[in-house]
Each structure stands twice: as C-alpha cells, then as structure tokens.
Image (cartoon, coloured by chain):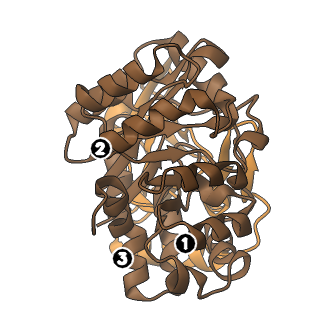
Chain colours: A orange, B brown
Amino acid sequence: MVVVKTIQHLSKQVEEYFNITRQVHQIVEESGVRNGFVAVITAHTTTGILVNEALPCVETDISDMLERTVPLEAPYAHAHFLPTYGATSNNSQGHLKSVLTGNHCLFPVLDGKIVCGGAQDIYLAEFDGPQLRKVYVEVMGE
Amino acid sequence: MLIDMHIHPIFYGPICQDEEELRFRGDTFGVWKQGPMDFDELFAEWDICGLTQAALLPLDRTTTAGGHVVTNEQVEQLCRLHPDKFIGFASVDPRRPDAAEVLERAFRDQGLRGLKLNPASQRFLPTEDCVEPLYELCERYNRPVIFHAGLSWEPGALAKYSHPLAFEEVLVEHPGLRVCLAHFAWPWVREMVMLLIKYPNVYTDTSLLYVDSPEEQMMELFTKDMGPMWFERCFPKQVMFGSNGPRFRAFKLKRALDKVPMRDYAREGLYYKNALRFLNGEEG
C-alpha cells in the first residue's frame, strides 16, 4: 500500500526552517499503513529536508554553519542569464545549501506510527524564499 | 518606501486563468519554467525588501505577434484589486490603425498612468510618424512613456530599434515629455549616460541583470560602467529602481543596490522620489 500526500508552505523569508514534524506524523497515522516506512521529499532544488532538534539555538548554528560554508557572495558559475528560463539565475547559494542538507528523509513506520527519537524533528528548510513550496510525504507498507 | 518601476505581471494569478494565453505570453515574451503566482506569494517578496508600489507594464504585440503579452484591461483589473500598490501602464502597438484611440481610452477611462512601448519587439523606430500621435497624447494627458531600451530578450526583438541613440530625436522634439529608456539601455550604458546628462526629461531604471550576480552587476554599473560619482553628481533625479520581474527578483536587486555606496539623497531618489517625479511630473 502506498499513500502520497502533499504539504504546502509559503515561506516568508529568504532562509527559513519550517517545522513539519506534526504534519508528517499525522499523515502517517491517517494513512492506514501499519508497518513500512515514510519518505519526506521536497519538490525543489533550493530547499532541504532536515532532521534535527527543534531548538532555536540549534537552528541558528545550522544556519550559521551553512552560511559560512556557502556564503552569499562568491564567484558562483550559476549567476547569469538563463536562455531556457528567460530569467537570471542568482540562487547558487540556495542550490548548494540544498545539496548539503539533502532533499529527503526516511523513517520506519511500526504499528501505524513513525518510529523516531524524541529530538528528531523534521524541517522543510527554505534557501531561496519567499516562495510557495511543496513537500511530498509518501507512506509505503502494509 | 520603494517603488519598482518595471514589472511585467505575466504570472499574476488573477490574470492567469487561460492556459493557451499563458503559453502565448511566455513564448512571446521569452520566459519559461515559471507559473502563476498568487498575491500572498508576491507580497511576501515585497515585504522582505520594503517594496510598496510597482508599475505594471502590459505589451501590445497585435501586428507583430497577433496578440498581447498582457492587455491594458488586465492591468486595469489588477490595479482595481490593489489600487494602493499597483501603478498601471498602458501599451499600444503604434502600427495599429486605432492606436491613438486605444491609448486615449487607457488614459481617459481606464486610469492608466503612462505608456509602455518596446520598439525592439514591436518593430518600430521611435522617430516614425506612427508614434507621434502617441507622444502628443502623453503630453496632453501629462503621462510619461517607458521605452524598452538596449538588449531585449523577447524572441525576434531587434536591438537596432532600441539603441539609446534611436531616441535622441524624440527627446529633442518633445522636451516636455517624460521618457524612461529602461534597463540603462544595457549594454550601451555610456550612451545612456550621455542622454541623461544632456536631456533632463530622460530617465532610466536599474532593471539589468544579464551577466552576473545582482551584487556584481550593480557594483559594476554604478562604479565601473559609470564613474563612482556620476549618478549622484550628474543625474541623481533620473534613475529609478526597476526589477524587470519576472526576469529578475526585486528583493535581490534591492539587496545589491543597498551595498552600492551613494549619498542619502541619491538613494532616496533611486528608490522612490524619482519614480514619483517621473509619474507625476513634479517634485517627488
């Protein structure tokens, strides 16, 4: 059995950490899947899916680390007019932060619930906002 | 306060109901892989850079493409939804037999605040006879005109019609007409500067991001393409903030301009006062 649901979020900042833990758990619990796993996958290339502790200080440290690793101003190749878009690419920072954070996470499902640690919150991380974003939650099992 | 004087509302949700029309718009304007955007998403972007108003530019391609990228009626519709935020412009194909009639209706009945023309894609020289009645209407109704100038990404657009020197005669013949040659006429920045220095009725905008990051290109424009003091010394009242959405995102351009050194009076002019003067014909 496979159940796919979508979470939509309109980010309001250039960078934002939006906690989707409760929504993902709810989708799993309402899916009818008793045993299997759940995948949380972003539909974008300038967002990430993170699993970490939902504390503001941890969010700050993650954000600072990513900013140090991928600064806004650097001689990125992806900063020019894109003929296939008719628009200018200027979001390399978002792409690279997305690479570092990954596009998905996976959790086991047992007895109709996600199995996870108490500090394992799930974030949709925005790196090129504001934008309307989509996350797919796919529950697979029996 | 920040006024964006260069927005093509191609993907604004309320005027994106028809798939075929949307495809025509994208192909004619030369913009792809983007889709309709609701106001919530749009204004979220405005909020992070303090954008308060934007000029919405339609484009009449009747004789060159058989339709409009966005119509005057659609701009009017958007302005009615947010009259405090949107400044509607009209567009008319100068080669239409009813061009003057369409423009007069836009000014008189539809509340549109200026004229937008793209000589490169509409395929006319600014000095051609067919455009003269449109200039006269702008003067009679005290409305400014924004011309596309310099490189135009629209398929089939020819730069020979949008070189800054192609406009000089219009500036001479119509000294009372407020004219914006958009995009700093890129890549002909020096020619644009020549016109800015000589003709007080000519304006330009910052909607050029063709080759670099916003930070790199704005610094290049204001400190290398031009001498670092030229803007604030020579024509501080003639450059307006413009993003060219949906090709470029306004907040990134604003972020880049914030980093360009300039005196406060020049920055205020750039961000909103020059736009008010251009629109109203008086001190902003």
Tag 1 residue? B256
In the drawing, what numbered circle is on residue B86?
Answer: 2
Q: Closer to us: mark 3 or mark 1?
A: 3
Q: Amino acid at mark 3?
A: Glu
Q: Are marks 1 and 2 on the same chain?
A: yes
Quadrant in the picture for residue B40: top left
Q: Are marks 3 and 1 on the same chain?
A: yes
Q: Secondary structure at mark 1?
A: helix
Q: Is residue A26 visible?
A: yes
Chain ID at mark 1: B
Residue displayed at 43% across by 81% down: B266
Of marks 1 and 2, which one's residue comes earlier in the chain?
2
Residue B214 rendering spot, x and y as whole percentages: 62, 66
Residue A11 rendering spot, x and y as whole percentages: 38, 51
Against B25, residue A68 (above or below) is: below
Of marks 3 and 1, which one's residue comes earlier in the chain?
1
